[in-house]
């Protein structure tokens, strides 16, 4: 159901380094969806609950701003 | 030296190298990416060459672009700074092939120290004690568990290809081993290599390193140690010389080990041999970790207590000069401490804080107070590069005075547009743990909340 889909946002300005879990991947809580890179630090964006990645909104190498939506997720 | 030096780096270190070149009347050439066209390090050099777009892969890590910039500018020497290509043997070779002198050791020495396992074998062969461990030749769970049992719990399980804490787990006992191994392997597998090695876990660890200087005539000296125990995410934030608790006999022993290793690889130039120590400092509980075949970020604390300019000696060694002093001539005056000012937020787990630097106030340099900065007001601090913006280094007659003066200097630092760790580091310098030299490598992370709170209370 669409209303159950949550938007995952970047907490910081960064580059998208790796898409660890493409759309359709089933994940456990705290599994990595996307790995960002900012100032030589890798910052994983993790699944807030167990669920499925619905859509990845960014591509590897792209710059993202603080607060930008990077994925949607269905718990 | 009347030939030009190309500085293959950016930020504070590129500006700092240009400063020594200017003092020695050596022309310097900066390189810059599109993100750095107006950066401080570009104006610090005599001329500058564009080398590519903002991403480091397309500029500061792009060997052909840097070699081409050197050829266009007529430079004959290349100083790699730290990070980027400074420990890249292919780059050192490409410089030689283009008729450029790479300011650093030979490609063979860089390679010998580049691989963890190979460096360890070399150290053992040179009589330098290494942390008890197992390289993981047999990757079965049974073999790794047997190795861990032989080394003795607690142990660290580490990804062979890891770095920055990735694929790393502490394991308290044999019962916890299978789950920890599996978790570390899952984490490492994302990066394509799930091989693991086992090391003894040092519970209360200090990071001690020895600066060495070697010329091309076979002279190898050490310039004492540095204590770089205050870290977050395995990256140093505060460094000092001398190390608290280090006596002359132990200093001589660590210096002997570092020089033995340098000789074993025919090392030329400035380098650093890193050790892990179990507090309190004793020769039998200090083990070799790795050698960094380049200038270190924290080299200024060594410069303050020895009175030597390490970049000057890198340049002189590169042009074939012999070191004109002996070990007994190396001074150790007073105490120096450095703090790394980073665009990051200690209150949010040290998350990076890129942004538009709308305000910047750093203390003015004075006797005993040095500021190595790479930024100016108006700069865009991007996610592409390291979060370290500047370093503040204090030199005083005693450790207590140096810690106090550095904390005071940090209090006066202000930025707008990016968050800075200055207040947090001042609180760390004023902590009982630091003043009484009871810190370990986990201190900044374990005391983070308390230090963040006490930084907020500090009068502005």
Image: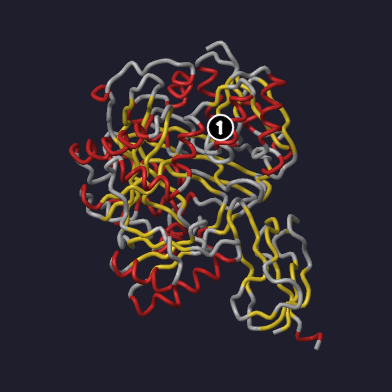
- Residue placed most toward the observer, B60 or B220: B220
Specify the farthest residue to the right. Answer: A2
Counting from the top left corner in percent of width and height, residue A72 is at 75, 75
Q: Position of residue B56 (x, y in %)?
A: 67, 43
The extreme left residue here reads B249
Q: Dot 1, crowdedness within 10 Å: few (<14), some or many (≥20)?
A: many
Tell me, yes or no, if residue B400 can be seen here.
no
Question: Quick one: which residue is furthest to the top in this view?
Answer: B2
Whether B403 is drawn above or below B152: the answer is: above
Residue B332: image x %, image y %?
27, 30
Q: Secondary structure at mark 1?
A: loop
The answer for which chain carries disc 1 is: B
Q: Is residue B304 left or right of residue A66?
A: left
Q: Residue at x 54, y 13 (%)?
A: B25
Q: Which residue is mark 1?
A: B80
Residue closer to the observer: B409 or B460: B409
Q: A19 and B263: which one is in front?
A: B263
Query: Residue B231, relative to residue A29: is it above or below?
Result: above
Between B272 and B342, the residue placed more toward the observer is: B272
């Amino acid at each position: 159901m669409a209303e159950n889909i949550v938007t995952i946002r970047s907490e910081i300005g960064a580059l998208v380094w790796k898409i660890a879990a493409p759309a359709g991947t089933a994940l456990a809580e705290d599994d990595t969806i996307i790995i960002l890179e900012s100032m030589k630090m890798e910052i994983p964006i993790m699944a807030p609950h167990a669920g499925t990645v619905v859509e990845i909104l960014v591509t590897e190498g792209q710059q993202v701003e603080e607060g930008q939506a990077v994925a949607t997720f269905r718990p | 030296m009347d030939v030009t030096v190309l500085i293959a780096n950016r930020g504070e270190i590129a500006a700092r190298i240009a400063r020594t070149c200017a003092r020695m009347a050596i022309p310097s050439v900066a390189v810059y990416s599109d993100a750095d066209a107006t950066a401080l390090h570009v104006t610090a050099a005599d001329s500058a060459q564009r080398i590519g777009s903002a991403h480091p892969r397309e500029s500061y890590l792009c060997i052909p672009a840097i070699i081409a910039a050197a050829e266009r500018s007529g430079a004959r020497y290349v100083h790699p700074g730290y990070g980027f290509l400074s420990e890249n043997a292919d780059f050192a070779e490409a410089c030689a092939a283009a008729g450029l002198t790479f300011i650093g050791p030979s490609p063979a020495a860089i390679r010998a120290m580049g691989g963890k396992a190979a460096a360890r074998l070399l150290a053992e062969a040179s009589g330098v004690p290494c942390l008890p461990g197992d390289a993981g030749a047999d990757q079965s769970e049974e073999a790794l568990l047997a190795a861990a049992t032989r080394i003795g719990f607690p142990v660290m399980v580490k990804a062979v290809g890891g770095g920055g804490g990735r694929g790393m787990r502490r394991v308290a006992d044999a019962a916890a081993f299978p789950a920890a191994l599996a978790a570390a392997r899952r984490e490492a597998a994302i990066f394509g290599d799930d091989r693991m090695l086992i090391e003894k876990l040092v519970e209360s660890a200090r990071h001690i390193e020895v600066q060495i200087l070697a010329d091309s005539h076979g002279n190898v000296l050490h310039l004492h140690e540095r204590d770089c125990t205050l870290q977050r995410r395995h990256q140093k934030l505060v460094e000092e010389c001398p190390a608290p608790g280090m006596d002359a006999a132990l200093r001589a022993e660590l210096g002997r080990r570092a020089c033995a290793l340098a000789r074993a690889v025919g090392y030329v130039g400035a380098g650093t041999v890193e050790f892990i120590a179990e507090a309190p400092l004793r020769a039998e509980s200090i083990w070799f970790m790795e050698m960094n075949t380049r200038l270190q970020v924290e080299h200024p604390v060594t410069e303050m207590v020895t009175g030597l300019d390490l970049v000057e000696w890198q340049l002189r060694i590169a042009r074939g000069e012999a070191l004109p002093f002996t070990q007994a001539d190396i001074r150790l005056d007073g105490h120096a401490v450095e703090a790394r000012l980073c665009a990051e937020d200690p209150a949010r787990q040290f998350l990076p804080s890129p942004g538009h630097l709308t305000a910047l106030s750093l203390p003015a340099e004075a006797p005993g107070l040095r500021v190595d900065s790479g930024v100016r007001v108006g700069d865009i601090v991007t996610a592409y590069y390291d979060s370290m913006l500047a370093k503040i280094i204090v030199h005083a007659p005693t450790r207590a005075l140096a810690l106090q003066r550095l904390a005071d200097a940090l209090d006066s630092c202000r930025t707008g547009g990016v968050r800075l760790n200055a207040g947090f580091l001042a609180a760390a310098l004023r902590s009982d743990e630091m003043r009484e030299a009871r810190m370990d490598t986990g201190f900044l992370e374990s005391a983070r909340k308390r230090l963040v709170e006490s930084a907020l209370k500090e009068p502005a």
